[in-house]
Structure formats: C-alpha cells, structure tokens
Amino acid sequence: METVYEAAGGADGMRRLAAAWHERVMADEIVSHAFHGGARPDHTERLAAYWGEALGGPPAYTTAYGDEASVQRRHAGNGEHDEMNRRAIACFDAALADAGIDDERVRTVLHDYFAWATFTTMYRHRLDDIDAGQAVPRWSWEGLQEAAES
C-alpha cells in the first residue's frame, strides 16, 4: 500500500510543503513569533525530512539531524500557545494547496497529522519531561502508529 509520504509526492512533495508552510508562517504575525530568534538556514530541509520520516518515508531526519527527543527539546518550554497552534495549522492547510497537494484524502490525513503533532509532540513539553532516544512518531492512513523502539 502506498504510504502517505508517497501519496504526498515523496521527498519533493515534502520539500514543497515545508517551503510553503515556512513561507506562510513567517508572514503570519502570530506564528512567526515562534521564529523570533530566527530560523536555521536549513529549516525547510530539516522539516521536510522530519515530516517525510513521520509519514512513512525514509529515516532522513534521524539519519542526518537527530531523534524525536531533539525535536521536542527544540519546541519545549514555550508555555501554552493555542492561538499560535491554530494559526500554524491554518497555514499548513493553505500550504497544502500551495504545494500542489490536491487529493482530498491526502490533504485530510496530512491535516490530521499536523494538528495532532502541533498539539501533542510539539507542545507542552518541559525539558526535564522529555525521554531521550525516542523514535519519530509514525503516521499512516489510519493515524498514529505504534511507536517502534529506537
């Protein structure tokens, strides 16, 4: 069965989506606050690799950049920011169209993944609550998959 990653265009689709989302969030007066310290020059590539791995693609993120714990640490300790999260999700939904992802089933699964990740793995973590060595959570057509040991 085709993975969500493949249905979304594989590595090229993830790069287009990450670039479109990044452009939209940087233009949003609320969401851009998350990047007040500036974004890494390779943010789009890192994000595309992370999403690709989470959506059934190759382990490009963990091979080149780190594990899930490193992602959570980068997003930890910012307190509640529900409005920012909702706006980030709206930017993601618009970025799907910008990236040329037109299939409604794919868009729905990607929306569900991003909304879940925004309000769980990327949110409400205190640094001392993050376990080392976590695998990137995997998302399929059926939603969150059982975590594999890393």
Image (spheres, rainbow, N blue to C red):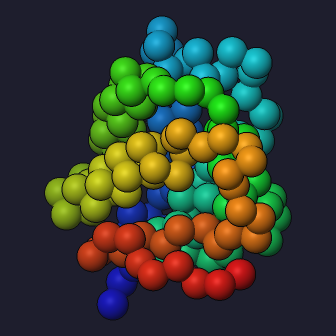
For image coordinates 69% across by 55% down, the residue present is: 130
Position in image of residue 34 (x %, y %):
60, 23
Horizontal relation, residue 25 to residue 73: left or right: left
Where is 32 relative to 100, above or below? Answer: above
Q: Nearer the viewer, residue 130 or 138?
A: 130
For image coordinates 78% across by 33% down, the residue present is: 40
Give the tally of numbered discs. 0
**Quadrant of residue 75 in the image?**
top right
Q: Nearer the viewer, residue 128 or 53?
A: 128
For image coordinates 73% across by 44% down, the residue present is: 127
Q: Quadrant of the N terminus?
A: bottom left
- Asked whether residue 62 appears in the rendered view, the answer is no
Residue found at the very far top of the displayed protein: 29
For image coordinates 45% across by 43% down, the residue present is: 118
**Quadrant of residue 33 in the image?**
top right
Residue found at the very far bottom of the displayed protein: 1
Where is 145 relative to 67, above or below? Answer: below
Where is 33 relative to 148, above or below? Answer: above
Position in image of residue 36 (x %, y %):
69, 15
Position in image of residue 12 (x %, y %):
54, 59
Position in image of residue 72 (x %, y %):
66, 49
Q: Quadrant of the C terminus?
A: bottom right
- Asked whether residue 72 appears in the rendered view, the answer is yes
Horizontal relation, residue 105 to residue 4: left or right: left
Q: Nearer the viewer, residue 103 or 74?
A: 74
Residue found at the very far front of the displayed protein: 128
